[in-house]
Image (tube, helix red, strand yellow):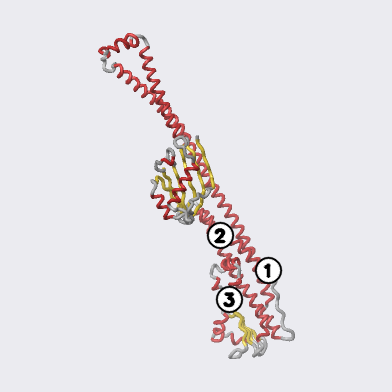
Amino acid sequence: VANLFSSHQRALLDLTFMGDVENRDKYYVLLADGITPKMTADKYMDKETFENELKQVLGDTYGAHDLDEDELLVVGKTGILVSCSKGNSLRHEPMVVAYASLHSRNVFTRCVFNRCFVLTDTLTLVHSLIETHDHDPANINHVRSLLSTCTEECIMLSEIQTFLLESLSSFEIPKPIPDDPSSARLLECLRVETALERMKARAIDIDKTITGAKNDLSALREQADVISRQKKLQTSKGLDESTKNLEDLFRANMRQGAVLEIMQVVLAGSLAFDVVDRTTGFYLGISQSIDWANDWLTPYLVDTPFVWLGINMFVWILFGGFLIWFMRYLAYMGTSVISLRAVHNRKIDMAAMRKYLKSRQIEVQDTDNDPRVYMKKYAWDEEPDSRWEGLPPTIEMTLDERYCFLLHIYIQVNKRKSKLSVEDAQRLLFEDLHQYSVFSNDSASAEIKEATLADVQRDD
């Protein structure tokens, strides 16, 4: 029978019976042409030998009824027995099968109720996790996972309740065989109409239970959203404080930079004065013994007011100006960076990729490990080579080492120290990867698959 079910129907059954479909309860129908020993119905309910024999087949017995002198009905928890004279039992088959069908629905309804109670217990657990979300950082992720699972289960249970109610609505109460008192007596004993009404009421109760679970689920989802918003608010406040601290630090660095620049100028002046003194010999007091100093410096420059001071100040300005220009030139050459961030999501050979990474001087490794993914980020500076046309680029690569995928590539090129563009740097990088046969479906032509450019930043 399982081969006749669709995948969705099998999923509904797995949900109802909690993955134990093969061992679900069955309801048995026994049509016998006789029973030994033949007695009246009340004697079979003796609480001893005869009733225990029937319990082995029918489960707990609910009652036994005489349909006529030769026909007997015994109703149990897991089955029903109808004994008639030889050759007459099959005439009750439609009515007995209809009753068994209704009772099978009752067994299924009981399992649906149990599954609803399990769902309610899960929602209670979710509520407890929400109340203690600050005790364990993993509680929020667990709550989100459970809420997603409960939402799916609520949808599927609603479908099951709808199918069950439709099945009961289309159920036809069997009619007794005309001019057959035994058939009428059988219908009276089975009380099919009463059982059908009771089943419909239980199906409606299931709908009420599922509706209550949906309301609880909505309330819990709102509580989880509130907690998420609170965490985002705390994160935002932390970012604001961090930004403020960074602004204060930046201003302090600016002040320190200005002070450092002044100190550099002062040191440049000290160096300039020492150079002038050592050139003229004044620092040793031997200038009187130097003829060109006596003939040219002393009468015209040293003895003339403010001239010697002006010469020293001029040399100071030359040294200080050169030092400031040189430092700003170094800053100018180091700040012009063009970067490219590309999303590739390409399947790779992890052994070949590790071999490639071993050939690089890895400076940074960052690992993101959780039950679903295992991602690692590698960053390095390429070795100096003529193909880079200047300063080698900085490369950052993100890999999914569990499922062997190249996810992202981030390339930085200093455009003032290198003539290479980021596109050319990416092309050269892929040529290296193809040489190491990193890509699983690598072609002989080593064509570079066009990447999806997610972000390109240019800082001048």
Q: CA distance from mark 3 to mark 2?
A: 29 Å
Which mark identifies residue 149? 2
Residue, disc 3: 26
Badge 3 or badge 2: first in the primary sequence: 3
Badge 1 or badge 3: first in the primary sequence: 3
Determine whether label 1 and label 3 are within 8 Å by CB. Answer: no
Determine whether, in the image, residue 202 is placed left or right of residue 298.
right
**Name of the residue lying farthest toward the front:** 445
Which mark identifies residue 249? none
Residue 453 lies in quadrant: top right
Badge 1 or badge 2: first in the primary sequence: 2
Residue 111 lies in quadrant: bottom right
Q: Position of residue 92 (x, y in %)?
A: 67, 83
For the question of whether residue 3 can be seen, the reply is yes
Q: Secondary structure at mark 1?
A: helix
* Label 1 CA crowd tier, 10 Å (few <14, some 14–19, many 20+): few
Determine whether, in the image, residue 255 is placed left or right of residue 28.
left
Q: Amino acid at mark 1?
A: Glu
For the question of whether residue 135 can be seen, the reply is no
Q: Amino acid at mark 2?
A: Thr
Q: Is residue 78 above or below residue 145?
A: below
Depth check: give the residue in front, 367 or 181: 367
Q: Position of residue 370 (x, y in %)?
A: 46, 54
